[in-house]
Amino acid sequence: MIEIKDFSAGYRGSKKIRIRELDIRPGQILGILGRNGSGKSTFLRALVGIIPYEGHALLDGTETAAMSHKDRARRIAYLPQQLSPARMDILTLASHGRFARMSFSKVMGEEDKKAVRRALERTGLWQERYRRVDTLSGGERQRAYLAMVLAQDAEYMLLDEPAAALDIAHQIETMDLLKELASEGRG
């Protein structure tokens, strides 16, 4: 469980978001609503260690800020709102989701390859895996990055506007996929 208590985060001394108390459990889908600039993305960025926070963000009793990047990435996957058009194919991008689980040699084992294939199949991109990410439409790119997050096999997924660039059919597919993942105990 992720426990948030007396939490605040922001930039250059300005606290964008304050949360008194919030518990996030595996298998739970939680949406954060607010106007533009209210701190939703700031909250997610702080939870994954991109920016500092004050207060407490505990993952099963351990302060997330005290965790190594690798340990945190094994437990929490993050999909940012702004996605750059990576200069690689979809398969390589999705494989990046396995970095936290790989040995020092960074050689993918069979389990890593299976996780990447599963992620690409779940996002409907297995047949397109050799296409370059920088040639994809915004929605296709969003799905490619979602595949990377799924390949990470983290217990928690923090997704910043995961359906924003998707057409209506893929928005529905993505929400159905997230419900399916939640029923499997991933949050």
Image: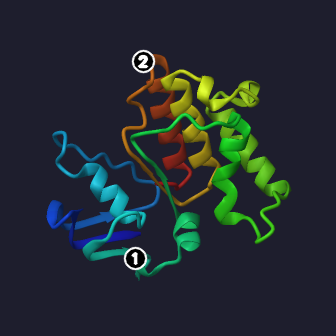
Q: How is the image coloured?
A: rainbow
Rendering coords of residue 162 (x, y %): 42, 37
Rendering coords of residue 21 (x, y %): 20, 68
User: Front-most of 169 and 139?
Assistant: 139
- Quadrant of the image containing the N terminus: bottom left
- How many marks the image carries: the answer is 2
Q: Which mark is residue 168?
A: 2
Residue drawn 65% across and 49% down? 151
**In terms of secondary structure, where does tag 2 sit?**
helix
Residue drawn 37% across and 38% down? 161
User: Front-most of 32 and 131?
Assistant: 131
- The disc labelled 1 sits on which kind of residue? Ala
Residue drawn 79% across and 48% down? 114
144 left or right, relative to 128: left
Rendering coords of residue 89 (x, y %): 71, 34
184 left or right, relative to 19: right
Q: Which mark is residue 107?
A: none
Residue drawn 30% across and 50% down? 41
Above or below: residue 137 compared with residue 75: above
